[in-house]
Image (cartoon, rainbow, N blue to C red):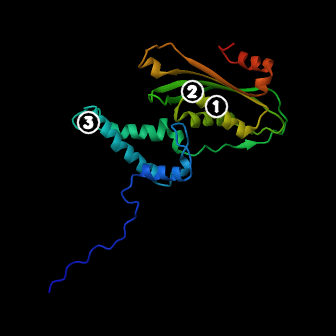
Amino acid sequence: MSSQPAADMTPTSPDEGTPVSVKIRERLAAARKRFHANDNIAEFIEPGELEKLLDEVEVKMQGVLDSLVINTEGDHNTNNTARRVAKMYLNEVFRGRYVAQPPITEFPNAEHLNELMIVGPLTVRSACSHHFCPVIGKIWIGVMPNEHTNVIGLSKYARLVDWIMGRPQIQEEAVVQLADLIMEKTQPDGLAIVMEASHFCMSWRGVRDNDSRMINSVMRGVFLKDSALRREFLSLIPGKN
């Protein structure tokens, strides 16, 4: 009697075949954490999952190109566009969603500095949450330290700006997020931030106004109470006085 080969008894994981984006969403939901466009979700992404997420986004981006009736197989210019777009979103323009906050070295205010310090202009590269169109601009940060304020290097401000802005953002919310983060890190007496940016959702589409800019500010602590200090900060920003 011929024997039949034994059935493959290799156990399968219950999660096998589940898209990695679904697994990440389930973790966020279990932790009751928000995952809006401008939220960072790095702590809910396990090692190796970002590469799998990139593969998943590539497949879905290819579906978008197919629905746009673009022959990516016959068109050498768009043959690998789905992969390039997936890498652009996850590893570049929206990287601030998927990686942990950059390490920030903090130093005690040993010299008890208590004079206004301004950093900027720092370059902003972001994208609006409404159309995923670029938002390009500059940020100026004013800090009024006290003897207990943690001092961070100038380059670290640029890294924090890049981390916060590297997500789909609304400018008004982005500046508040940045202010909250810097206040938490440095604990100053006051913080002032001014951002000026061009929004491609106005120049590239929509009204197609190439000259429009959006300027907004956030004032915290003594900058809210002391109008003279507020004027000093604004007067020291080139082109803003």
Front disc: 3 or 1? 1
Drawn side of residue 87 relative to residue 185, left or right? left
Residue under label 3: 72
Residue type pointed to by label 1? Val
Residue at 80 percent across and 17 percent down: it is 228
Can residue 179 be seen here? The reply is yes
Q: Which mark is residue 104?
A: none
| Residue 171: mark | 2
- Residue 45: image location, x then y, percent: 51, 51
Looking at marks 2 and 3 on the same chain, the residue that comes earlier in the sequence is marked by 3
- Residue situated in front as seen by the camera: 112 or 234: 234
Q: Earlier in the sequence, mark 3 or mark 1?
A: 3
Which residue type does callout 3 highlight? Thr
- The quadrant the N terminus occupies is bottom left
Q: Which residue is mark 1?
A: 176
Q: Position of residue 14 (x, y in %)?
A: 40, 63
Q: CA distance from mark 2 to mark 3?
A: 35 Å
Q: Which quadrant does the C terminus fall into?
A: top right
User: What's the distance in space between the residues labelled 3 and 1, CA to CA?
Assistant: 41 Å
Residue under the image location 66 percent in, 23 percent down: 217
**Dot 1, how many residues are within 10 Å of its Cα: few (below 14), some (14-19), or many (20+)?**
some
